[in-house]
Amino acid sequence: MLALQREILRRDAWPILRVALEGQDESWWSAARDAHLDGHAPLELTEAERTDAAVSIHSPDNVTALAGVDPDRLTRAARARRAIRDAGSRRRWNVTLWPVPALAQQAGMGTVAFARLVERALFLDRPDPVAAWRELSDRQARLIERLAGVSEIRIEAPGTDLTLHVGGRTWVNSDGKRNLPSGEVFTGPLEDSATGTIRFTIPSSPGGVDVAGVELRFQDGLVVDARAERGQDYLRSTLDTDAGARRLGELGIGTNTGIDRPTGMILLDEKIGGTVHLALGRSYPETGGVNESAVHWDLICDLRDGGRLLADGEPLQVPAGRG
């Protein structure tokens, strides 16, 4: 953070550091009263509206700090902070991570081994990381050219057969300018198009809540049945957050083979080459999506063992690589 502060100052901008203390989130949720769950600090909204850019570096001391928090309290607070998220989404932003021991433990790895995985995911093990990112961007641009005229995407895998319509929507090349690491192309499916069933085979831990084995059944774009092997209460509460939480806001295709195993961290796992992810809730306006929600939860389906993507009935070859 201090190195980042120096670079911001060198560019004649004003850095404002927001540093979380160990145990801060757990302490906040244990003491928060109704007014805190149903509102927000005015200064937070002012900051989101008045700042030009934000960089978030995930480095938790405990990835399960919120495991004991009532999911209904989490969704209440998410609804109340919608204005802050909306204001923040209009500025430049980047989300990244630092390979701390807690994230390594979540991934089931040693800290050194996890740091090496993060290096590979960021192409920092390459002779020229910037050139590697440019090459990935070019590959993804070619994939977008293939997808630009596609009307229907079908996802097939064990326990999964889901159809989405994407005609008229814009595909975005996510090549490291926002999420870092990155390596995906994404769009906003037509909000009433999702039909069928999908099983998300990679566990997801939104907000430090352990969720795994999620199965969703869609009809005319709406989740009509949902279950999870772990985290059922969180899944139920999230779907009930608001009217948009039961519809899809994003379809993404991962291309980054530098991430070769699930880690439990969505920022990494949704980029794994050979996976596809769907986000419940809020759309990204640049895709043409119009779904509105306080929720944006990426759920990941691994297609590397018996799965495939079909674009207007034709198998889609995804150009994955590391530069």
Image (cartoon, rainbow, N blue to C red):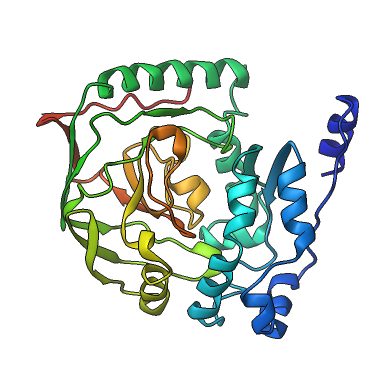
Which quadrant of the figure has residue 169? top left
Residue 256 appears in the figure = no
Q: Where is residue 304 in the image (x, y as percent from the top left)?
A: 26, 42
Q: Which of 115 and 142 is in front in this view?
A: 142
Query: Vertically, is 160 above or below 155?
Result: below
Say which residue appears at 39% left-offset and 22% top-offset. Answer: 140
Say which residue appears at 45% left-offset and 48% top-offset. Answer: 269
Q: Is residue 56 shown left or right of residue 215? A: right
Q: Nearer the viewer, residue 137 or 62?
A: 137
Q: Which of 314 and 157 is in front in this view?
A: 314
Quadrant housing the N terminus: top right
Q: Position of residue 285 (x, y in %)?
A: 45, 38
Q: Is residue 168 shown left or right of residue 65? A: left
Q: Which of 110 and 27 is in front in this view?
A: 27
Count of all numbered marks drawn on residues in the image: 0
Residue 23 appears in the figure = yes
Say which residue appears at 49% left-offset and 78% top-offset. Answer: 71
Say which residue appears at 76% left-offset and 52% top-offset. Answer: 46
Q: Position of residue 141 (x, y in %)?
A: 39, 18
Q: Is residue 187 shown left or right of residue 121? A: left
Farthest-out residue, left: 313
Query: Vertically, is 312 above or below 189?
Result: above
Which quadrant of the figure has residue 283? top left
Query: Vertically, is 323 above or below 80?
Result: above
Q: Position of residue 127 (x, y in %)?
A: 62, 18
Query: Vertically, is 313 above or below 34?
Result: above
